[in-house]
Image: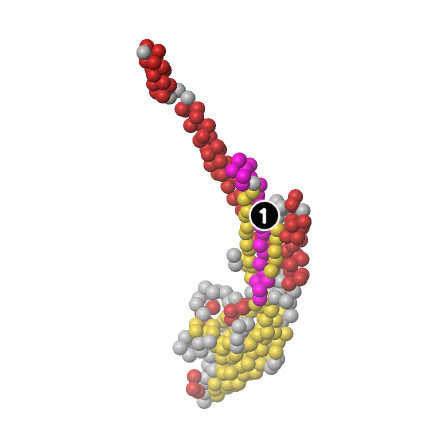
Amino acid sequence: MATRSTFFQLCDKLLADRSGNFAIMTAIALPVVIVAAGSAVDYTVATTEKTRLQEVADSAVLAGGAVFDGTNFAAAEAVTVHYIKGQVNTATDEEITEDKALANKVKYKVTASDKTLKVVLQKSVPTSLMQIANIDTVDVGVTASALSPMKPEKITFTPTKAQGWYFKKISVLVLRKGATTEELLGTVIYQPTTQTNGGQGTYVANPAGTIDLGKYTNLALRMDIKNDGCDIGYKATVKNSAVSCAKNNGASYKSYNAVLRTDDPNTSNHLFVDGKQVPVGVKASLEKYFGCAKKQEHAWEDGGGWDRQDFFYTVTATCGADGSFVRLTK
C-alpha cells in the first residue's frame, strides 16, 4: 500500500512539474518568430529593389521617349533597352525558361501606344530568412510610361476678319536649336483704311498657304501694334475718317506701341481660342493652341476692350509627336 502511495505521489509531481514548458514553447514559437522577422527584413530588401527598378524604368522610358515621334518605335525601343541593360542585369523570358540560373535577373518589356512609350520591369528578389518557410523569392514589378506630346510641323493661317483703328501685324516665329534669335516664317498684316464702324481695313497673309515650320525648339505668334494706324516708319493722317499713311522718320513712329506674344504669360489673356479667352499667366502650349487636335479659331484683342476682338483667323496644323517635351505619365 505504501509502494502504491509512493507511485501516485511521483505521478502527481511529474504532472505538476512546469520547469520544461518554457523550453518547449520556445522551440515551438522560434520558427514562427524567425519567419516573421525574416519577412520584415526580406520585405524591406524587396521594397528597396522595387524603388531602384522604378528609378531605372522612369529614366529608361524618358530616354526612349526623347527620340520617339509616334512612328519610330524600333529606334525608341533600342534606346530604352540600351539604357535598361546599362543599369541592371537583364534576361528575356525565353532565356529564363532555358536557364533557371537567370531567374533573378530583370525581365523587361517595351511597348508603345499612339504617342506613349511604356516600360515594364520585373524581378524575383532572393529571400534569406523567409526560406525557412520555403519562400525563396519575392516578385517585384514596376511600370513607367512617357508621353511625347504633339508638336506642329506645318501650320496654315487663314485670316477671316480684322478691324479696329490700330495697325497690327501677326508674325509666325520659331527658334531653332542653338540659335539666339528667332526666325520669321510668315506674317498677317492689318492696315486700317477708315475709322468708321469701329475701324475697318485690309489684311494680307504672306505666305498665303501652308507654312513649313521645320525643326525648332519654340514656336510663338507675336502681334505688333501701332496705335496711330500705320506701320513703323509711317505717320497716319485721318481725314473724314479715312486713314492715309506717309513716311515719317520721327522718333515716335520708329517703334510699335505694344507687343503681344502667345508665349508671354503677362499678355496671354489677349488671345481667344474658339471663343474662349485664355487666362492671364498662361504660356500657350504647342499642342493646345496651334490646332493639332482640330482646326481652331483664334481672335486677338489689341488692347482697346475685351468685348470686341480685332484680329480673327483660323489655324490648322499637321503635327507629330515631339520627344523634346516628353514627360512621365505613370
In the image, taking residue 282 as reference, residue 218 lies left or right, namely: right
**Residue 200 in picture, x, y percent from top left:** 48, 85
In the image, taking residue 44 as reference, residue 69 lies left or right, namely: right
Q: As shown in the figure, which amino acid type bears the numbered disc 1?
A: Lys
Instruction: Write down the quadrant of residue 213 in the picture.
Output: bottom right
What SS does tag 1 mark? Answer: strand
Q: Is residue 132 magenta?
A: yes
**Residue 188 or residue 313, whichever sits in front:** 313
Residue sitting at 42 percent across and 79 percent down? 308
**Residue 22 in picture, x, y percent from top left:** 41, 24
Give the vertical position of 6 relative to 149 (above or below): above
Q: Which residues are magenta?
A: 112-135
Residue lying furthest bottom = 240
Q: Identify the residue position indicated by label 1 in the image.
A: 123
**Residue 295 or residue 237, whichever sits in front:** 295
**Residue 244 in picture, x, y percent from top left:** 52, 85
Give the vertical position of 303 relative to 102 (above or below): below
Viewer can see residue 27: yes
